[in-house]
């Protein structure tokens, strides 16, 4: 998703809301030195947070993660849309 240098929380929320249900690549800081990457779908849109459903290949049980729009605005969390041709490869990887 485009990162506007003058974006507001409402801009981020509208952008995330526009892609509800879309497959995304997610990169987030777990701690100061640890970073994790996941592939999932934007599932829920709420006033302060959004949720992402991530499939866990080991247990086959979906995991639901939540993030605030300020996480995206401050780039603690980065999300990128996965295009249709990439989606099959991402899901099978």
Image: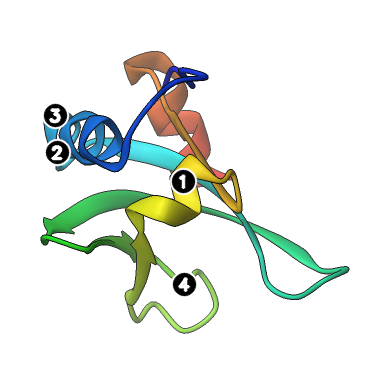
Q: Residue at x 41, y 53 (%)?
A: 70
Q: Secondary structure at mark 2?
A: helix
Between marks 1 and 3, how big is the CA–CA gap? Answer: 15 Å
Asked if marks 3 and 2 touch (Cβ < 8 Å), the reply is yes
The residue singled out by tag 4 in the image is: 56
In whole angstroms, how far apart are the C-alphas of marks 4 and 1? 23 Å
Front position in the image: 80 or 58: 80
Report the label total: 4
The residue beneath circle 1 is 72
Answer with mark 4 or mark 3, whichever residue precedes in sequence: 3
At label 2, counting other C-alpha atoms closer than 10 Å, the crowd grade (few under 14, some 14-19, many 20 or more) is some
Q: Which is nearer the N-term, disc 1 or disc 3? A: 3
Q: Residue at x 42, y 26 (%)?
A: 82
Cα distance, mark 3 to mark 2? 4 Å
Residue under circle 2? 17
In this rendering, which labeled residue sits more in front, label 2 or label 4? Answer: 2
| Residue 37 vs residue 74, the one in the foreground | 74
Q: Secondary structure at mark 3?
A: helix
The residue wearing badge 3 is 18
Sort mark 3 into few (<14), some (14-19) or many (20+) by Cα contacts within 10 Å.
few
Residue located 52% across and 19% down the image:
5
Number of the front mark, 1 or 3: 1
Q: Can residue 83 be seen in the rendering of this structure?
A: yes
Q: Quadrant of residue 58?
A: bottom right
């Amino acid at each position: 998703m485009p990162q506007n240098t003058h974006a507001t929380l409402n801009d981020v929320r509208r952008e995330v809301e526009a892609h509800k249900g879309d497959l995304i690549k997610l990169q987030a800081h777990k701690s100061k030195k640890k970073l994790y990457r996941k592939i999932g779908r934007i599932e829920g849109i709420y006033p302060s947070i959004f949720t992402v459903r991530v499939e866990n290949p080991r247990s086959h049980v979906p995991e639901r993660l939540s993030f605030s729009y300020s996480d995206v605005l401050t780039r603690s969390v980065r999300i990128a849309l996965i295009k249709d041709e990439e989606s099959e490869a991402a899901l099978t990887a």
